[in-house]
Image (spheres, grey):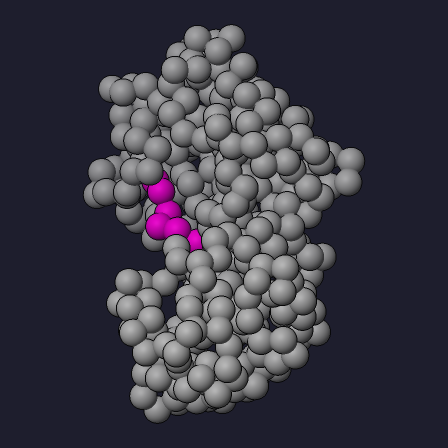
């Protein structure tokens, strides 16, 4: 992504400081730090002041920070907090915005106990996350690439698997394929759950083998160039029985109904409700135990959330998942998930992998 985009974001934040009654903003949460500076190292802090921004890091990242960011770079040989405090004192700032949900108590107390006289830490909640919800054209290109890598990894893997493979070996193969195709890493621990364990929405892969008659949930995502993708597809080991077919049909119809509800101005709760209405028609609404979706980008889970009590209004450029499911303890579960982008007139489904129940 071009440095001009990071600079534009920092200027927008700096311009909004007065209306928030702040003299500066301190950002140390990695996704927000990357969003505003381009810096991808594991240790950094960004101070945004009117007219300038300073990126603090340690000697390990001196060269990397200069390559990734146009901010003024300050390399600290000791704790970043000490150089940060010295800069705050020299700048004479009084009201310092910080992200309370993104800062450890230890860091907060360390800064607070050393603040210059009459300076204060002012909590700022969700400001940068709100900005991140609507993706730029450049971000959508990266998300699209991540989605395509994820789909190709799934398709390459599924074409080769046979009954008897272990859940954890299938998960490892999916992650190996996505890395070979360009991903840095999975965007979360890949979920592969077979048989009755498919009723666990976030099951971890085990040494259990896929056996005939199993229903298998595969939930996977890739991080590529820093941006996440997310997809869930279902496998059947051998021909599915009538109950599985009905359950799968219900969830697939619910997912399509939710996608059809996605457009600018619609509330997230109404998208969730569209999925639940379909499942209710099948008598499976009580088996849907999580939200219909979530935003994704620099994090695999980020605002907006698409659940029963979430009332964000969708806007063009939002990247979200649509993933209703139904789970019956002792039998199994079904979930179908795509990555979707809100457009000016509706939405675009980025996930290219067919939604059919894959027979292995």
Main secondary structure found in the magenta portion: loop
Front residue of 70/334: it is 70
Residue 146, above or below 154? below
Q: Which contiguous range is marked in magenta?
A: 187-192
Question: Can residue 178 be seen at all in this image of the molecule?
Answer: no
Q: For the C terminus, which image quadrant?
A: top left
* Residue under the image location 27 percent in, 30 percent down: 197
* Residue under the image location 58 percent in, 20 percent down: 274
Tell me residue 5's x, y (percent): 68, 69
Determine the image quadrant of residue 326. Answer: top left
Tell me residue 180's x, y (percent): 48, 63
Front residue of 223/47: it is 47
In the image, residue 140 lies in the stretch drawn in magenta = no
Tell me residue 89's x, y (percent): 44, 84
Determine the image quadrant of residue 271. Answer: top right
* Residue under the image location 47 percent in, 50 percent down: 300
Residue 116, above or below 316? below
Tell me residue 164's x, y (percent): 28, 37
* Residue under the image location 64 percent in, 45 percent down: 318
Mark count: 0
């Amino acid at each position: 992504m071009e440095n001009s985009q990071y600079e534009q974001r920092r200027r927008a934040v700096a311009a909004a400081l007065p209306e928030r009654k702040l003299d500066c903003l301190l950002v140390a949460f990695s996704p927000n730090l990357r969003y505003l500076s381009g810096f991808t190292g594991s240790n950094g802090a960004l101070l945004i002041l009117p007219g300038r921004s300073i990126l603090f890091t340690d000697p390990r990242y001196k060269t990397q920070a200069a390559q990734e960011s146009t901010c003024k770079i300050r390399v600290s040989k000791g704790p970043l907090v000490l150089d940060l405090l010295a800069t705050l004192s020299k700048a004479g700032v009084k009201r310092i915005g910080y992200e309370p949900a993104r800062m450890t108590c230890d860091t907060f107390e360390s800064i607070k106990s050393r603040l210059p006289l009459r300076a204060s830490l002012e909590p700022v909640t969700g400001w940068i996350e709100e900005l991140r919800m609507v993706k730029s054209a450049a971000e959508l290109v990266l998300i699209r690439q991540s989605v395509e890598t994820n789909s190709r990894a799934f398709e390459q893997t599924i074409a080769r698997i046979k009954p008897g493979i272990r859940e954890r070996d299938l998960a490892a193969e999916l992650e190996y394929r996505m890395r070979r195709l360009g991903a840095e890493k999975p965007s979360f621990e890949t979920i592969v759950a077979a048989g009755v364990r498919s009723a666990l929405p976030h099951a971890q892969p085990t040494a259990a083998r896929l056996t005939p008659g199993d229903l298998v949930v595969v939930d996977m995502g890739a991080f590529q160039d820093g941006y996440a993708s997310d997809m869930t597809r279902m496998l059947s080991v051998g021909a599915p029985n009538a109950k599985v077919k009905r359950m799968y049909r219900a969830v697939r119809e619910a997912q399509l109904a939710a996608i059809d509800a996605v457009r600018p101005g619609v509330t997230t709760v109404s998208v969730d409700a569209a999925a639940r209405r379909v499942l209710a028609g099948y008598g499976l609404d009580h088996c849907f135990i999580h939200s219909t979706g979530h935003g994704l980008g620099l994090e695999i889970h980020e605002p907006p959330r698409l659940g029963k009590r979430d009332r964000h209004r969708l806007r063009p450029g939002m990247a979200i998942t649509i993933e209703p499911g139904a789970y019956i303890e002792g039998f199994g579960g079904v979930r179908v998930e795509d990555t979707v982008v809100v457009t000016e007139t509706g939405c675009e489904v980025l996930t290219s992998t067919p939604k059919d129940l894959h027979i292995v």
